[in-house]
Amino acid sequence: EIKEQRLSIIINEIITNGQVDIKAIAKKTQCEPMTIYRDVDDFILSGVVRKEKGVLKSGDSFSKA
């Protein structure tokens, strides 16, 4: 349940701002940056999210509804 809440925050930030800072989102969700990386691992593997220098961005297969 908590992971889903973090993922929701991450995805909303990416939709709103085009990207999200790992450290900022970790602080906001009160967890470690590594936890955020683990949370979005499936998204990164599927190409929905890209990881770039401590920032998560929308990937090629990410589309806004």
Image (cartoon, helix red, strand yellow):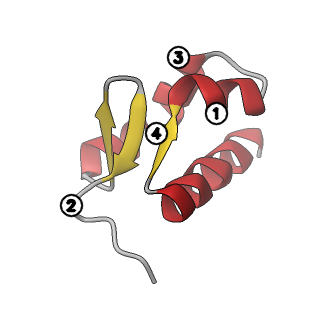
- Marked residue nearer the N-terminal end (1 or 4): 1
The amino acid beneath tag 3 is Met
Q: Of all residues shown, which one is farthest toward the bottom?
A: 65
Question: Which of the marked residues, 3 or 2, is nearer the chain's N terminus?
Answer: 3
Disc marking residue 25: 1
Label 2 vs label 1: CA separation? Answer: 22 Å
Looking at the rendered structure, the kind of residue marked 1 is Ile
Residue at point 77%, 40% (across, down): 2
Q: Which residue is mark 2?
A: 60
Q: Secondary structure at mark 3?
A: helix
Q: Is residue 54 left or right of residue 9?
A: left
Viewer-nearest residue: 5 or 17: 17
Q: CA distance from mark 1 to mark 3?
A: 11 Å
Mark 4 packing: few (<14 Cα in 10 Å), some, or many (20+)?
A: many
Indicate the position of residue 27 as horizontal and vertical percent values: 72, 24
Query: What residue did someone put label 4 on?
Result: 40
Q: Residues within 10 Å of mark 1 (few under 14, many from 20)?
A: some
